[in-house]
Image: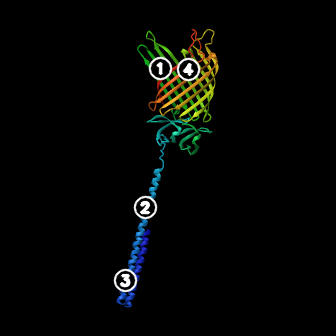
Amino acid sequence: MIQNIFLTILGLLLFSTIAVAEELATNQSEAKPTAVEEAEIKQSANESTQTAEDELSQLEQAVVESSDDSTTAVDDEAKAAADEASSKPWLPAAKEFDWVQLTSGEWLKGEIKSMYNKSLEFDSDKLDLLEIDWEDVKYLKSYRSSNVNIEGREPLTGSLQISGDKVTITDGEDVQEFARHDLISLTPAGDREADLWALKFTLGVNLRSGNTDQLDYNAKFNAKRRTARSRFILDYIGNISKTGDEAGNLIETINNHRLSASTNKYATRYFFYTPLFAEYYRDPFQNIDQRATVGIGLGYTILDTGRFEWNVNGGPAYVSTRYISVLPGEEQKVDAGALVFGTDFDAELTSALDFIFKYKIQASKPEAGGYTHHIIATFENEITGSLDFDVSLLWDRISQPATDSGGNTPEPDDYRLTVGVTYTY
């Protein structure tokens, strides 16, 4: 448009110059100029025409160059915009999966199981169940609603995004932001009950035949149900051993079972209380037909660094013990009060090797066994994402075992070394 206007104006100027030159030549011819004057007039007209044409050519070149510069500027701006867009970090749309980005830049797609004690449990279809140190998580976004426990606030529910040091919880049009260091725990909101559970099962079997026939069986089971501010834990340990006698019959030599359960409520990041814990124990070879313990307690997290976790807990309890048989004049069933103290320590020694230590001591009156303790130290070495190789050392002690009707007093200490394979769900 601008180029056409300039060309039109220049054309008019050129036409006016030529007209003036012709008029001047006519006037001169009317005055009958000499041959020399006529030549000078023609030379002047030619020079004016050439000058106008040169100006027109220069204007056309200037317009073209201006157009080229504008096009180049537009191209440069488009390229800069494309470079800027390509330099922005890629963020996935959490529509069917939860997403986690590690500090290494790697992305994981799957389902968030929970985050407790600076450890994120994440279920990947390809990598199975993963436990990720919270400090290794750079970005997290959930496609499902989550229950989120923030320091000093009631639990919140909504879609969750964690980026850098910021936690964003969105519930409809309500958007709230918090500092990452105030985040205590999180779990899926739980459209399915199974989303709130984590299960672990260990099985070990030892068969021997020949000069000695022997069958050893041991099993461990652990179940956890977690919400943003509570945790339910169920543990079972069972051991059975049979040895062949001279007649070739398998005689039972070990048969004990321990089942314990507790519910923890988090008041702060490190302090929790236990409104109820219970334990059932049976060991005929310790002259215990059954022992039931029920109590309440308090707990505190001493150490929590992601790779290492150390908790202590304790409280008063009621103990009811029934013996298989007792000496004449002794009570076969004993009820008593007790004090219970426990601690557990978890350590991630390497990316594939974990160490788990649990200790529990119970003090009561002599008729109820005096003080008893249960210790289990476990090394778990990862085989695959869901399978671990498990080696455990157990030590059970009853300081004052009850003598049976035949006058036999059980040994106070039992030691066991078990080997098995653990499956985690």
Q: Is residue 207 left or right of residue 156?
A: left
Closer to us: mark 4 or mark 1? 4
Q: What is the x, y in percent for residue 262?
A: 58, 27
Q: Quadrant of residue 398?
A: top right
User: Is 253 rendered above or below residue 179?
Assistant: above
The residue that disc 4 covers is 396
User: Is 420 rendered above or below residue 130?
Assistant: above
Distance from the alpha carbon under mark 3 to that under mark 2: 43 Å
Q: What is the x, y in percent for residue 276?
A: 61, 27
Distance from the alpha carbon under mark 4 to that under mark 2: 83 Å
Query: Element type at marker 4?
Result: strand
Q: What is the x, y in percent for residue 80?
A: 46, 56
Query: Element type at marker 2?
Result: helix
User: Is 206 rendered above or below residue 155?
Assistant: above
Choose the circle earlier in sequence order: 3 or 4.
3
Res 43 label: 3
Distance from the alpha carbon under mark 1 to that under mark 2: 80 Å
- Residue projecting furthest to the left: 35
The residue that disc 2 covers is 72
Choose the circle earlier in sequence order: 1 or 3.
3
Q: Nearer the viewer, residue 353 or 204?
A: 353
* Residue 56 visible from this viewpoint: yes
The residue that disc 1 covers is 217
Residue at image x 41%, y 67%?
64
